Image (cartoon, rainbow, N blue to C red):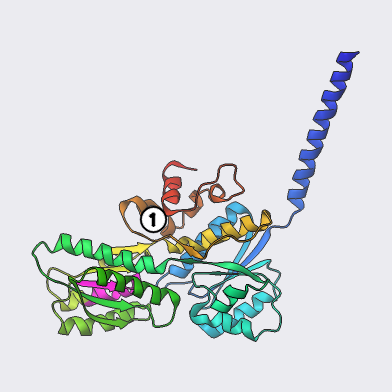
Amino acid sequence: MIGSVRSTIFFAWLFLISFAEASFALDSADQSPLKVHFVNPGHEFDNSTGLFWRNVSIAMEAVAEDLHVDFTSSYANRNHIVMKDQLLEALQSDADYLIVVDEKKAVTQLLKQLDTINKPLLFIFNAPHDQLIAHKPKWLVGYLAPNNFDAGYKLARSLYKEAQRRFTDEISINMLALYGDHLTDSAVSRQHGLELFLRQHPQVHLVHSDVANWSKDEGFRKSIGVLSLSHNINVIWAANDPIASGALLAARQTTSQPQPVIGGVNWDDVADNERADVSVGGHVLLGAAALIMLHDAHYQQRAFETDGNFEIFEPNTQEFRGLIDALHQKELTKINFKRFSATHEQPWQFSLQNLAKCLDIGC
């Protein structure tokens, strides 16, 4: 009798487990995927400012595939009027969340003009206006920005070390600095990082500085004039890799050997004959990190937790060669981005080192 009761209880228990698993599977199948739209401020195809923004979306697409997010992008082609129009369209779409970049504060300028904002927005790369951060309206999910100050400083430090290695004679180090622009957070912060390095290293002389508007063509034009007059420049700090590529072409036309040490920011994939000596990057993966964090906050029903700043910049050393190649060869799908989600049983911290490790040994 006792054995019969135990058997009955055992089979009832198995039935309940099977029913629960079936119900969970049914709920998961019926649940619509999270819909996220990214208003990308950059270009989808190659141009004089590089492929940085296209690669941002490619990385986010790889994350979306692993986390089953319905992800779409629109490209404003660096046109702030187009970007505003695309944001207005996205606000009328069926997306659950919008991800935006507040370039030159164009997004916050538009949002201030709207009577109602009916979708939650996450800002990446540039923080929204200080007033928004202070008051945090219900529609503001948060923001995630790379530490561009750190990028400017690390680029200067890497260039300095390479110049010490290349120029074995005790000669003075004379620098040309080419900034991105006068307004964006990223440009200003990178410039401030360089300025701190220069204050700490008075042996490095800033001979000339100018703005090249993130462009290879302007990097060339601004460099060739300065290098034609100032033959003692042996280091060129550039706010991004396209500017650095333009400066490199100018240096080859105007200076003799040894060539100046040249570096930029982005981890861009350029032809060998245009490759600078140093590239500091990794922030191209910031959108991927933001999408993972947004996914986790949504499904765990909690706030988007971050203080806004994200440490993600590293020089293009051999440690990150596989990660850089995977990015430019569109092979980021080899990374299991589920492993970097808080919903995983044993999540890994999102870092360049761990992403590189995931490619090398699997995750």
Quadrant into which the N terminus falls? top right
- Residue 37 magenta-drawn? no
Write the start and end of the magenta stretch as one range: 235-250
- Residue 243 magenta-drawn? yes
Residue in front for this viewpoint, 183 or 91: 183
Which residue is most to the right? 1
Look at label 1 and name its amino acid: Asp
Q: Is residue 323 above or below residue 225?
A: above
Q: Residue at x 63, y 72 (%)?
A: 136
Q: Quadrant of residue 46?
A: bottom left
Q: Is residue 5 above or below residue 145?
A: above
In this rendering, would 116 be left or right of 87? Answer: right
Name the residue tied to disc 1: 325
In this rendering, would 175 be left or right of 15? Answer: left
The secondary structure making up most of the magenta span is helix
Residue in front for this viewpoint, 5 or 41: 5
Q: Position of residue 27 (x, y in %)?
A: 77, 49
Q: Position of residue 154 (x, y in %)?
A: 32, 64
In this rendering, would 175 be left or right of 214? Answer: left
Q: Residue at x 18, y 64 (%)?
A: 163
Q: Position of residue 299 (x, y in %)?
A: 67, 55
Q: Quadrant of residue 2?
A: top right
